[in-house]
Amino acid sequence: MNRHLKRLASLAAVLVAHLAAAQAAPVLPPAPAAAASAPAPAPAGTPAAAPALTAEDLSSFLDGLVPFALRRSDIAGGVIVVVKDGGVLFARGYGYADLERRTPVSPESTLFRPGSTSKLFTWTAVMQQVEQGRLDLDRDVNGYLDFGIPPYQGKPVTLRQLMTHTAGFEEAARGLLPARIEEVGLERYLKEHVPARIFPPGDVVAYSNYGCGLAGYIVQRVSGERFEDYVQRHILQPLGMRHSTFAQPLPPELAPLLAKGYKTASDGKPQPFELVNPAPAGAMSASALDMARFMIAQLQGGRYGDARILQPATAELMHSRQYTPAPGLPGFDLGFYQEDRNGLRIIGHGGDTIVFHSDLHLLLDKDVGVFMSFNSAGRPDAGGAEMVRTAIFHAFLDRYFPYQEPAPPALPTAKADAARVAGWYEVSRRNESAMRVIYLLNQVNVAPQPDGTLVVPMLTDYAGQPLHWRETGPLQYRETDGRNRLSFVTGTDGGIRHWATDYIPGVEVFQRVPAYRSLGSVLWLGGASVLVVLAALLVWLGGRLLRRRYRATLELPPRLRRTRLLSRLGALALFADLLGWVVLIAVISADENVLLQGAAVPWLYVLYVLGVVALLGALAVVVHAVRGWQVGSRSVRVRLGETLLALAVLYLAWFIVAFGLVSFSARF
């Protein structure tokens, strides 16, 4: 999941702390503590002295930091709540819930859309059903469904794999944010959008909204209650979350309380209510203080006040590691991803719609929880909401839980290992049924440096500068002068299989790409081939204009004249097809809803048909080049030119097939 803001913690130190317009947080009753689960191993280091985590210090710290961040990143409003020891320690709104009416954000009553943070409620519902014996985490999910999920190499999907995003599903974006309420429906969505499985179950982490929707549907089936109603009755109501719902659209009593969503504050145009399919994956609307109740319940072993949503043993299981993407990195619990940092055991989940951006973090050993949400995407060149929330949380950790890690020793294998891991990688969270070309453009290059460090351009600091990574152990790296880690995994043959990093949540890994399919080679060979085709088209057009002007004729045998015409039309179709894909990708980049709402489908099929014509045209170009060598009347220069063109169109034809430009699939 654009990015990066200057390190807010250091900038905040020079700001004069001042109070933003906000409402004081009402006091929530504390919940009894529960036994903590065993901590996961943390990197060796030394905790440093820190100010006490108090409401007063948080006010001074965040009131200086957050308003500056909102202004800098052009965000209309946000909210932060911190819980500690079973109660709310701090809750404050910043900026505006409604810019036009100048309505301030209220942590108690303003509703935000936490996006995928909603999944934690779905996973909690699953664990409730596990407690009651209705669900088994390791049973084939087809046993709970009224339709089938096809096996992968004979292996089924289990709930445990759904909760760790290791079911092997490809990415499914179509219909995720539908345009009309009539398109919202859990059962219909799941049955109409079954994604292909591209990885063995339990093997590769690849984040899946569909998988979470499937889990919510299973809860609906075994409980006999509509999913939205189940969560309302068994989680939200027991916790007293009166300003929260999964209902779409919002019920009349809550609709006026929803914060307006904006692309940027300066734009000021409120965006429509974002419908979410499937609902269990991200449809929730909630106030910050309601989210505080949920955090307290999770921290207190499933209990909040007199209410209990999970038994302590179930909560402990939910917070225990189930999957690790690479050695030395945090992994996945049951629904939560691990975010260990500063020597602390941290679990959480983020969430993003187009305009709302949220994060929830639980510091298990400190009995502390942090939730924040923002109602604007913000300016990408200033970091945007995604990086604002990361910077605020890291600044929070560095202030109240500072940690000094020892400098990694220099390893003699650093340069050799850097050369070994160098190359191109593609994200596991991808679609292979349609539009594979988009994921080609998102490939990441790992570049070795002369000193043995690595640079990965997508991994940058808050100023947008690429980070350097120094080897600290066999194929394990740490950010130079930082805390983030990166680790490579080898296959059974000893070759590099993938890498992962805690720079981003562990919901995906980056898999090695063969050289011939890498973005680097495709840019060079594909770019050169397109230039050859374009040059040929221009030469043909210029020749035709010159012959018309000077009333000249082109002397060719009849069989060559026919294949020449077909080859020209074929090259034109090939160029038009590729140009069409460039335009479609540009449109999708400018407006994600074209993809998410399925508006791209008609254009996809037009391009698929044009792609078939282009492939036939490529064949015509090759046939014409071969015949050119068979006819001795043509000059060597012309025949070499036709041969070069044939090689170019053959490469582009391979590109069209290899990257799904004729897949005739609308499953994306």
Image (spheres, rainbow, N blue to C red):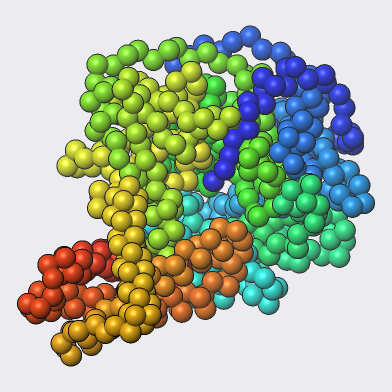
Question: Would residue 591 be seen by someone viewing this image from the given angle?
Answer: yes
Q: Is residue 159 left or right of residue 23?
A: left
* Residue in view at x 75 percent, y 43 percent: 75
Q: Which residue is at the far right?
A: 101
Question: Would residue 570 be seen by someone viewing this image from the given angle?
Answer: no
Q: Is residue 394 above or below residue 512?
A: above
Residue 554: image x %, image y %?
24, 82
Asked which quadrant contains residue 407, the reply is top left
Asked which quadrant contains residue 388, the reply is top right
* Residue in view at x 36 percent, y 82 percent: 548
Asked which quadrant contains residue 491, the reply is top left
Q: Nearer the viewer, residue 77 or 82?
A: 77
Q: Is residue 564 above or below residue 383?
A: below
Q: Which residue is at the far top?
A: 49
Q: Nearer the viewer, residue 459 or 119?
A: 459
Q: Nearer the viewer, residue 649 or 307?
A: 649
Residue 316: image x %, image y %?
54, 38
Q: Which residue is at the far bottom?
A: 558
* Residue in view at x 40 percent, y 60 percent: 437
Residue 293: image x %, image y %?
74, 41
Residue 49: image x %, image y %?
63, 9
Q: Nearer the viewer, residue 544 or 344?
A: 544
